[in-house]
Image (cartoon, rainbow, N blue to C red):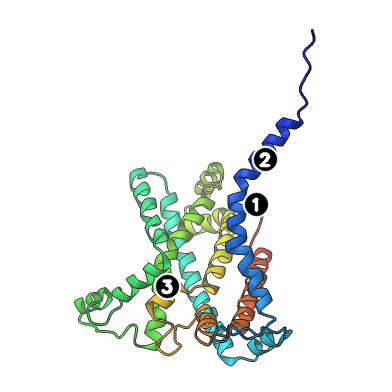
Amino acid sequence: MTNKKKPPFPTLWNNTRAAFAFLAPATVALALIGIFPTVFALVNSFRQYNLARPKDATPFIGFDNYLNVLNDASFWTALGRTGLFLITVVPIQLALGLIIALMLHKPGLSGFKLLARMSLVIPLATAPAVAGLIGRLIFNRDFGVANALLSVVNAGPVEWLGDTTNAFIAVALMDIWQWTPFCALVLLAGLTMVPNEIEEAARLETRSRWQIVRYVQLPFLLPSATVILILRTADILKMFDTVFTMTRGGPGAATELVSVYIQRIGFRVFDQGVASAQAILMLILTIVLARLYIKFVYREI
């Protein structure tokens, strides 16, 4: 009596069904949270859609919404303000993150470095809306921590959130506090890619710490820097929670970044068509900037 081998197809089919069963929840969540809103915004950007008149028709108007956006001086002002915010905070975050990463990369003090790495996670674990509320408390004119520290040196009180320049600085400081640890951890991961033999040989050749960083470690940090630039640029272009809870975009429009302006057009003016066109343009800008970062910053080692 011979044993017949069972065909592998039932097992392969069962494995495929199991794989689909595990992937289905993530796929459904991605479709509902990411893909559907993007497609919905893309469709709305070509229609006349006003939330204040939900029973009205939403006719197709072509590229009229995009033309309105491109001719909107307030949109370009908000975008320029966002660009200023980007070039202000990201270089500082990269510089401070590099300093922290280099300190944690030094040999020795393993217990201290473990505690420091755990502490770096705290700002990252803070929700942006909570960070904005913390910022409102820190920079409050009457009982804020910032003015309390200034009073120690007989300075202040400073009107942080009521002054146009100071409010911009206060939001930038909160963003630097929250995201510098992210830059430090990413750059620290990049430093671990540097072979120990190369670092030891460089230390024997020169005692200059700057030359070791520039010629030995920096080439290995370029991929990490590219990741930071892409993620931080995308995050700042959609930065809303911290600014809205901290300043509501004020005083005036001093801290009205482009995402806050899009929210105002979409949910205060109720023009979903124009707001969707603005959001799609920001998506395109993010993709273009990411490609530029990869082209001019990223280097393979």
Q: What amino acid type is highlighted by mark number 3?
A: Thr
Task: Judge from the rendering whether residue 67 lies leftward or rightward of residue 142; answer left or right.
Answer: right
How far from the left and from the top, in percent, is residue 104? 41, 51
Label 3 element class: helix
Residue 201 occupies quadrant: top right
Nearer the N terminus, badge 2 or badge 1?
Answer: 2
Q: Which of 259/274 is in front?
A: 274
The dot on residue 214 is none
Task: Judge from the rendering whether residue 260 lies leftward or rightward of residue 299; answer left or right.
Answer: left
Q: Which residue is mark 1?
A: 301
Nearer the N terminus, badge 3 or badge 2?
Answer: 2
Q: Which residue is mark 2?
A: 17
Label 1: few (<14), some (14–19) or many (≥20) C-alpha neighbours in 10 Å? few
Q: What amino acid type is highlighted by mark number 1?
A: Ile
Mark 3 or 2, closer to the camera = 2
Q: CA distance from mark 3 to mark 2?
A: 43 Å
Q: Which residue is mark 3?
A: 242
Q: Which of 108/238 is in front?
A: 238
Answer above or below: position of 47 versus 24.
Answer: below
Q: CA distance from mark 2 to mark 1?
A: 40 Å
User: Could you tell me which residue is drawn at 32 percent across and 76 percent down?
Assistant: 136
Label 1 element class: loop
User: Could you tell me which residue is drawn at 59 percent across and 92 percent down?
Assistant: 73
Answer above or below: position of 113 versus 266.
Answer: above
Task: Judge from the rendering whether residue 130 lies leftward or rightward of residue 187; answer left or right.
Answer: left
Marks 1 and 3 in Cβ contact (< 8 Å): no
How far from the left and from the top, in percent, is residue 95? 47, 65
Quarter of the image for the N terminus: give it.
top right
